[in-house]
Amino acid sequence: MTDISLKLSAYLDGELDVAEAAAIETRLAADPEAQAELDALISAHAAAQEQYDAELSHPVPLTLAKKIKAARPTSGPRPSRPIWGTLAASLVVFMIGGVGGYLLKDQTAPPRTTGWLSDIADYHGVYASQTRHLVEVGANEAQHIETWLGKTVGVSFTIPDLSGFDLTFEGARLLVANGKPVAQLMYRQGDGTVIALCLQRSGAPTAGAPTFTDRTINNFDFVTWSAGNADYVVIGPRGLPGLKAMASEASLAL
């Protein structure tokens, strides 16, 4: 792997400092081959996520399920990545081992809500419980977050100030949902409640004033809307008051 390849991978993961990220962005603007390589990395990331999701649709062998349950810690800090990622990797290893004939014939996978909101709910269920590792890039690098995630997701945005709702911006993460990169902006209320604002490039531009839609998935409340070339969602704990007002305020700033 070349040096630029390593740099692009680190850039995509938010591991570069401000100066290094700025140098990469300058290189991308002037070097079509580097931009094409970054696009390929994003596509590969999305494809890997889709493969994991596909594996999760298969029934789990009873013996493997027992091993996973026995290996799962019963106390201590929660894992820093979604549980389903580890499970998916285990399923891939299991299938390569050639013992697919032991799949439970009468067992079916639990129903799963389609679309990017289900993935966002999965991510939020893990990351909202984190403290030190809540975000990849902290709020002190807000300008870098806007540049890095804006370019990666393909949507220019400004981080909304939601301090009027007792929300402090903590930083951001890069996610993949429904096979596409997603910017996740994380906020925390004074009582520790975590609210996330996520945005993803939409399939077609949307004109006119946004329409806000409420729904609940996996015990989280969502407010979704579309504007310009992006789809947006604000997610918080079920029953949290003021979520639609937060979404409305965010839509004005983005």
Image: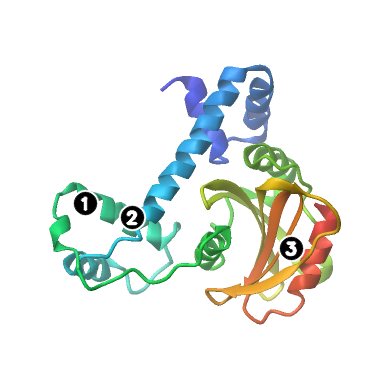
Dot 3 surroundings within 10 Å: few (below 14), some, or many (20 or more)? some
Q: Are marks 1 and 3 in contact (CB under 8 Å)?
A: no
Q: Which amino acid, by three-letter code, is at mark 3?
A: Thr
Residue occupying the point 53% across, 41% down: 13
- Residue 194 screen position, x and y as percent: 64, 68
Q: Secondary structure at mark 3?
A: strand
Instruction: First in sequence, mark 3 or 2: give its number.
Output: 2
Q: Are marks 1 and 2 in contact (CB under 8 Å)?
A: yes
Residue occupying the point 70% across, 46% down: 204
Tag shown at residue 168: 3
What residue is pinned by disc 1?
Answer: 95
Q: CA distance from mark 3 to mark 2?
A: 37 Å
Q: Which amino acid, by three-letter code, is at mark 1?
A: Met
What residue is pinned by disc 2?
Answer: 55
Q: Secondary structure at mark 1?
A: helix
Tag shown at residue 219: none
Could you tell me which quadrant the N terminus lies in?
A: top left
- Residue 127 screen position, x and y as percent: 53, 62
Quarter holding residue 187: bottom right
Q: CA distance from mark 1 to mark 3?
A: 45 Å
Choose between 127 and 104: the one closer to the eye.
Answer: 104
- Residue 77 screen position, x and y as percent: 43, 67
Q: Are marks 3 and 2 in contact (CB under 8 Å)?
A: no
Colouring convention used in this rendered image of the protein: rainbow
Q: Is residue 194 at all visible to an observer of this figure?
A: no
